[in-house]
């Protein structure tokens, strides 16, 4: 009994401290961030989001971020501050799919408001100014908000030929130079998508431009919102966490937030019962495909891939690749174009380049991540336990 | 004295584009367009399973996120000798159609709109007069009321007063080249905001049969995988519901807004500002029957603006040159034979492009040795010249209503208007495809895939029409893996640097003769370049370098 209450005390104290830190940080942000352009409550009203559904959203987001329910008011506060956080968004070797994904995010609806009102001080796809004026905007944002802005990066950095596979701006600076200048002044660097996280398609073998993710290319710590493109909810959640604690959320060994990337696609897949029952799609368009059976034999990489796609889905939850009958291609994992290829075959059948070696390599990565996942799971169980006690 | 102006980055596009112009007395005398990023994806494709190529080349671009996927799958189907079943063809058309609608609307409002529309001027509009104006262009305009327009104004005013304009900061508001009255600016700005919401609906349409957007994931060589969605009437209903919502926006906002712009910018259109090379090419797209004989967009050419004499297209006459591109090599080569190695020579000592030498990562595609423009305008001019009843009728009626001659098509305004008319034309046909799909399912046809396997050896091409124009992928297979891969992309055609004879590419030529109101503000340059809907990441690629290592390059 004594042991149990000691444990409870420790947990309570830890929570109290964390709450204090969170409150203090939000207050500090309230004082230091630029004034809001639009009042958040009015915005919610205009978009027809009732007080009740906003509270629902905060509860859901609190749980998704693996926080105790007592943090719900803090999540609400952070949501209010969201549009005040200056964001400088850089594009390097990429396809703009991540920007598109965010622009078209519509689920859940509060996330969509956050993304609509995000304070983009610099974003080449959207900004009206070009050329010299665009360059001035970048310089001004970095100067005015030095140490305060969040630098979001979409795209890998080509390191080959001294970075000259990519030049930007009237002075023809390389992507590498600009990335170094801007990230050194940022409060945090968030890599959106698998290109800035891990290099992605341009870094696939033989990687002709020696492209790499931002963390690798600059030797800095980044949070990696992996995916091609990632789910927009994983981006908003990470920014909310940053607003609440002044720190990035707990990450796995690959820099991905555990709250979003701590679980395997396979474990929460709607087709999982068919896997367990041995019911597989044997070839495209067969009767199994019509009945929604498991896609493992036609190359689904869900068993090797950590992400929340199976739970959050895409485009207002309307579908996701497994629902679309194709299966997962592992796009949140580093080097997936090489380690998961050929995409229409299970990895066990892979023979090109020595099957053993590849399977071993994937196994190693998996183990590392699983350990992080188990740790996170233990934490979540503790929180759950705590919540029940309170009731 | 002439002055060199550098615009880099060109914003509101996909990718990294640099434009340099030579200006004399505010008139553009010469121009160079350069793509400043190379990713080498086609090098990466070598040695891979051809069935993986579709998903990889899709990563050329997240804006035209479906286009390369389909072209690659079709190139492989040609090489494998397989034809997808009718249901797969229809579903692909539906995904591609959703891509067109979303792309075109987003392009007009979010990427191109601010070249025509002065946001700050909208603040001084009279909302009541704006309602009157909107009703002059459509009987029941989209989201049109005095209260709504006032609310939009208030929202904008808050932004301006806060001093934090975000993406609208430091732009060209008040430039003399903005021609719209305040009320017109207010109407289109209000639709700018509406269209942000609408693009989500378009993305959902694509995701219903595509699994997600961007980067749908339901095509395979021989068919589609979204079997459960394609054969489910509820899913088809979800698509149809969104299509109707989208069409309503096109009819009551997009088309009227383009007509408003045409009213106030018609002099520029009539003067042919932004015309460019006046050669137009279309591969033809959207197969509407099982034999592939009926196409929604016809295939063909128009040379030197001569719409009285349309020409047939011969795929063998397509080549790519690299005389002014940062690659080694000489004569133009057909895509099957293309061989290229990077040869970066950088900028001159003033950080300007070396216009007489190599100056872009973009290659220069040619048809019969000439540069050609591709895109919605090219599709419409080719169809018009061939006497395509429906498209010709749509164009003639619009021109008649606006009181403009057919030659106005050869301009920046014509390019923008053709894209809007195309959206309407396509949207009106998509419902028929849904009926076709339902009829076939009712008749018991549930085939979604044709069995096939990778051949030991083969070659194939996929030539389609995508939102930005004619797209071709060429694949060669040896020992069951890719031995050669080449994509000639719409933006490669349009962004091409000079050819062997020194003739400018479509972007470059389109800028010549344009008068700039203020040489420090590249507004007119942006307007014309954006009218092509540039997509740079797509445009740059390379095949078959002799070695895979990154060599040392001498950088000037």
Image: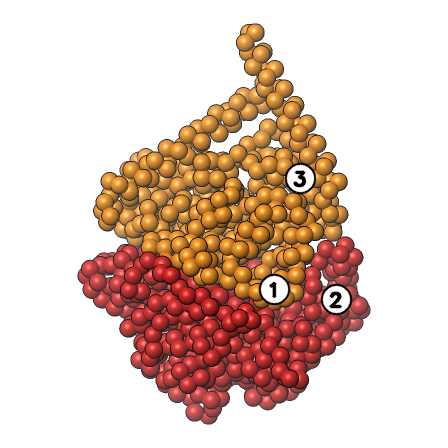
Q: Which residue is mark 2?
A: B120
Inter-mark Cα distance, 3 to 2: 31 Å
The chain identifier of the residue carrying mark 1 reads B
Q: Are marks 3 and 1 in contact (CB under 8 Å)?
A: no
State the count of labels: 3
Identity of the residue furthest to the top in this view: A2
Q: Quadrant of residue B167?
A: bottom right
Residue B110: mark? 1
Identity of the residue furthest to the bottom in this view: B308
- A387 to A271, vertically: above or below: above
Residue A78: mark? 3
Image colour assigned to chain A: orange
Q: Secondary structure at mark 3?
A: helix
Q: Secondary structure at mark 1?
A: helix
**Residue at image location 39% in from the left, 80% down from the top:** B366
The chain identifier of the residue carrying mark 3 reads A
Percent x, y for residue A234? 53, 43
Q: Residues within 10 Å of mark 1 (few under 14, many from 20)?
A: many
- A211 to A131, vertically: above or below: above
Q: Residues within 10 Å of mark 2 (few under 14, many from 20)?
A: some
The chain identifier of the residue carrying mark 2 reads B
**Residue at image location 58% in from the left, 11% down from the top:** A5
Percent x, y for residue B127? 78, 67
- B296 to A40, vertically: above or below: below
Q: Dividing the image into 4 quarters, which one contains the N terminus of chain B?
A: bottom right
Image colour assigned to chain B: red
Percent x, y for residue B401? 63, 84
Q: Residues within 10 Å of mark 3 (few under 14, many from 20)?
A: many
């Amino acid at each position: 009994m004594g042991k149990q209450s000691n444990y409870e005390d420790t947990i309570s104290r830890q929570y109290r401290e964390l709450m204090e830190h969170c409150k203090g940080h939000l207050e500090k942000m309230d004082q230091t961030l630029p004034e809001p352009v639009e009042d958040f409550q009015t915005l919610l009203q205009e978009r027809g989001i009732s007080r009740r559904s906003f509270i629902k959203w905060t509860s859901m987001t609190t749980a998704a971020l693996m926080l105790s329910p007592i943090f719900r008011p803090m999540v609400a506060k952070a949501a209010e501050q969201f549009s005040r956080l200056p964001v400088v968004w850089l594009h390097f070797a990429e396809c703009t799919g991540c920007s598109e994904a965010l622009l078209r995010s519509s689920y859940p609806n509060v996330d969509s408001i956050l993304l609509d009102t995000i304070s983009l001080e610099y974003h080449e796809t959207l900004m009206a100014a070009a050329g010299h004026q665009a360059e001035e905007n970048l310089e001004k944002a970095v100067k005015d908000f030095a140490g305060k802005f969040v630098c979001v990066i979409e795209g890998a950095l080509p390191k080959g030929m001294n970075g000259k596979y990519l030049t930007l701006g009237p002075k023809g600076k390389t992507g590498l130079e600009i990335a170094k200048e801007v990230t050194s002044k940022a409060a945090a660097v968030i890599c959106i998508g698998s290109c800035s996280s891990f290099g992605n398609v341009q870094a696939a073998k033989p990687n002709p431009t020696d492209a790499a993710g931002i963390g690798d290319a600059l030797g800095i710590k980044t949070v990696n919102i992996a995916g091609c493109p990632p789910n927009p909810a994983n981006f908003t959640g990470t920014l909310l966490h940053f607003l609440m604690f002044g720190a990035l959320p707990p990450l796995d060994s690959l820099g991905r937030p555990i709250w979003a990337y701590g679980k395997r696609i396979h474990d929460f897949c709607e087709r999982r019962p068919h896997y367990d029952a041995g019911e597989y799609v044997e070839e495209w368009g067969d009767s199994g495909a019509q009945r929604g059976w498991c896609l493992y034999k036609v190359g689904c990489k869900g068993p090797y891939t950590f992400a929340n796609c199976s739970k959050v889905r895409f485009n207002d939850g309307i579908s996701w690749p497994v629902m679309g009958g194709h299966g997962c291609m592992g796009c949140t994992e580093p080097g997936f174009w090489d380690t998961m290829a050929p995409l229409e075959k299970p990895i066990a059948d892979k023979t090109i380049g020595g099957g053993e070696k590849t399977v071993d390599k994937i196994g190693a990565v998996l183990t590392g991540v699983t350990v992080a996942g188990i740790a996170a799971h233990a934490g979540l169980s503790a929180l759950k336990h705590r919540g029940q006690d309170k009731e | 004295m002439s002055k060199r102006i550098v615009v880099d980055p060109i914003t509101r596009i996909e990718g990294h584009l640099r434009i340099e112009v030579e200006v004399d007395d505010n008139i553009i005398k010469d121009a160079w367009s350069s793509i400043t990023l190379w990713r080498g994806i086609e090098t990466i494709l070598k040695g891979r399973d051809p069935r993986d190529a579709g998903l990889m080349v899709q990563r050329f671009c997240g804006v035209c996120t479906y286009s390369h996927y389909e072209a690659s799958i079709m190139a492989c189907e040609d090489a494998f000798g397989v034809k997808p079943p009718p249901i797969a063809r229809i579903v692909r058309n539906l995904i591609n159609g959703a891509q067109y609608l979303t792309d075109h609307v987003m392009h007009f409002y979010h990427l191109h709109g601010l070249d025509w529309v002065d946001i700050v001027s909208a603040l001084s509009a009279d909302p009541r007069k704006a309602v009157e104006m909107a009703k002059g262009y459509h009987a029941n305009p989209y989201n049109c009321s005095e209260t709504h327009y006032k609310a939009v104004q208030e929202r904008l005013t808050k932004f301006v007063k806060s001093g934090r304009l975000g993406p609208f900061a430091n732009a060209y508001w008040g430039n003399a080249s903005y021609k719209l009255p305040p009320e017109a600016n207010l109407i289109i700005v209000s639709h700018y905001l509406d269209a942000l919401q609408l693009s989500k609906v378009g993305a959902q349409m694509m995701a219903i049969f595509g699994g997600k957007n961007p980067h749908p994931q339901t095509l395979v060589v021989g068919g589609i995988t979204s079997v459960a969605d394609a054969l489910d009437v509820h899913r088809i209903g979800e698509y149809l519901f969104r299509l109707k919502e989208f069409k309503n926006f096109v009819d009551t906002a997009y088309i009227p807004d383009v007509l408003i712009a045409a009213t106030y910018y018609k002099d520029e259109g009539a003067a042919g500002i932004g015309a460019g090379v006046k050669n137009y090419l279309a591969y033809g797209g959207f197969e509407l029957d099982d034999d592939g004989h009926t196409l929604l967009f016809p295939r063909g050419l128009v040379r030197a603006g001569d719409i009285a004499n349309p020409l047939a297209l011969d795929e063998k006459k397509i080549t790519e040159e690299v005389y002014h591109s940062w690659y080694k090599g000489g004569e133009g080569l057909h895509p099957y034979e293309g061989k290229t190695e990077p040869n970066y020579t950088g900028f001159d000592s003033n950080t300007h492009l070396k216009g007489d030498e190599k100056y872009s990562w973009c290659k220069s595609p040619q048809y019969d040795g000439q540069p050609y423009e591709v895109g919605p305008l090219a599709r419409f001019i080719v169809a018009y010249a061939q006497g395509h009843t429906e498209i010709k009728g749509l164009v003639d009626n619009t021109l008649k209503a606006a009181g403009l001659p057919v030659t106005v098509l050869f301009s920046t305004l014509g390019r923008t208007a053709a894209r809007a008319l195309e959206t309407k034309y396509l949207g009106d046909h998509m419902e028929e495809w849904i009926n076709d799909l339902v009829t076939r399912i009712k008749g018991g046809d549930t085939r979604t895939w044709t069995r096939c396997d990778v051949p030991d050896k083969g070659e194939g091409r996929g030539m389609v029409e995508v939102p930005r124009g004619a797209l071709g992928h060429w694949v060669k297979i040896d020992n069951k893996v890719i031995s050669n891969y080449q994509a000639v992309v719409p933006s490669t055609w349009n962004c091409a640097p000079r050819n062997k004879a020194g003739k400018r590419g479509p972007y470059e030529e389109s800028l010549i003769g344009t008068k700039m109101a203020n040489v420090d503000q590249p507004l007119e340059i942006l307007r014309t370049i954006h009218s092509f809907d540039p997509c740079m990441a797509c445009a740059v690629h390379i095949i078959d370098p002799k070695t895979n290592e990154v060599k040392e390059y001498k950088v000037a």
